[in-house]
Amino acid sequence: MTKSSEMLTALMRSQTASPVKAEQIRCFTQRTVGSFSCHGMAPVDGEATAKINQDCGCFVNPFAWPGQALFAVFDGHGPEGEVVSNAAMSNVFELLADDLRLELDTEAAMVGAFDGAELALRKSFPAEALHSGAVAVAVLLRLDKIFIAGAG
């Protein structure tokens, strides 16, 4: 179990007699935030043809603890862009959630998550990482502060 899921589980089992509702720990309601993604298109001989969508993203609310949310978008490119973008998304999420610096040195935690995701990608998918990649942007919203990291 990751640090973020442990924190959320502990919160949900709080010592109060009344159960904690999801609305009390989220930054946003489900009516406030939405997402949309369109399938990929590639130009072939002057016409557009369908291709694998190499983009992915995530919205985690709450992220790591109440009052904090994570938004991230990964735009894959190259022959294995969908593999790279999905691996990058998973790694950034896990590494950031488990980074002990997240609360006090958020910038270092975000840089560490991006650097760690690249190292994990090169180790787990060496061929795909050689000829494909992803552009990534992550936004961490914490109460009245916003932290943004990007790569690619």
Image (cartoon, rainbow, N blue to C red):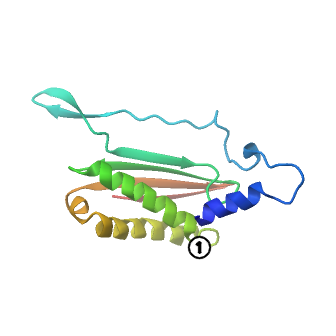
Is 66 left, or right, of 120 in this rendering?
right
Q: Amino acid at mark 1?
A: Arg
Q: Which residue is mark 1?
A: 101
Tell me which residue sits at (31%, 44%) in the image. 54
- Relative image position of residue 19 (x, y in whole percent): 82, 49
Q: Quadrant of the N terminus?
A: bottom right
Position of 120 with respect to 30 (left or right) is: left
Instruction: Write down the quadrant of residue 133 in the picture.
Output: bottom left
Asked if 72 appears above or below 149 in the picture, the reply is above
Q: Residue at x 63, y 59 (%)?
A: 5
Above/below status of 117 relative to 34? below
Q: Is residue 93 left or right of residue 80?
A: right
On the image, the x and y values in percent for residue 29 come to 67, 39
Q: Secondary structure at mark 1?
A: loop
Q: Residue furthest top?
A: 47
Q: Is residue 126 left or right of residue 70?
A: left
